[in-house]
Amino acid sequence: MKRQVCIICRKPLNSGIIISGKRICKCCEEKIINTQMNTDFYEYYKNCIKKNIVQNALKGEEINCQNYHL
């Protein structure tokens, strides 16, 4: 069985949260919650989540925005 690691710090997991099958350790979860917007740390966490969760969630799904109206 593959050992689960945090998508942010890549350390083995003991506890934390699972989002779309991807895991974030408790330590990184707390850092994300307490990080101020418009900081380099915020951008780093946001990019890790985007790369590991959002892009994987969109794989295989056809995105059709033609019927979207503002």
Image (cartoon, rainbow, N blue to C red):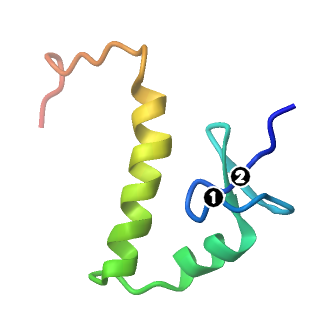
Report whether 18 appears left or right of 49. Answer: right
Give the residue type at disc 2. Answer: Val
Task: Indicate the position of residue 46 as horizontal and vertical percent values.
Answer: 39, 62
Q: Between residues 37 and 69, which one lies in front from this camera angle?
A: 37
Spatial CA span between label 2 and label 1: 5 Å
> In the rendered view, would you say 36 is above or below 42?
below
Report whether 10 appears left or right of 52. Answer: right
> In the rendered view, would you say 10 is above or below 64?
below
- Residue 10: give its label: 1
Q: Residue at x 71, y 64 (%)?
A: 25
Report whether 31 appears left or right of 48. Answer: right
Residue that label 2 marks: 5
Give the residue type at disc 1. Answer: Arg
Q: Residues within 10 Å of mark 2 (few under 14, many from 20)?
A: some
Q: Residue at x 53, y 74 (%)?
A: 32
Q: Residues within 10 Å of mark 1 (few under 14, many from 20)?
A: few
Q: Are marks 2 and 1 in contact (CB under 8 Å)?
A: yes
> In the rendered view, would you say 66 is above or below 69?
above
Q: Tag 2, which secondary structure?
A: loop
**Sequence-first tag of 2 and 1:** 2
> In the rendered view, would you say 60 is above or below 32?
above
Task: Indicate the position of residue 66 as horizontal and vertical percent values.
Answer: 13, 16
Q: Tag 1, which secondary structure?
A: loop
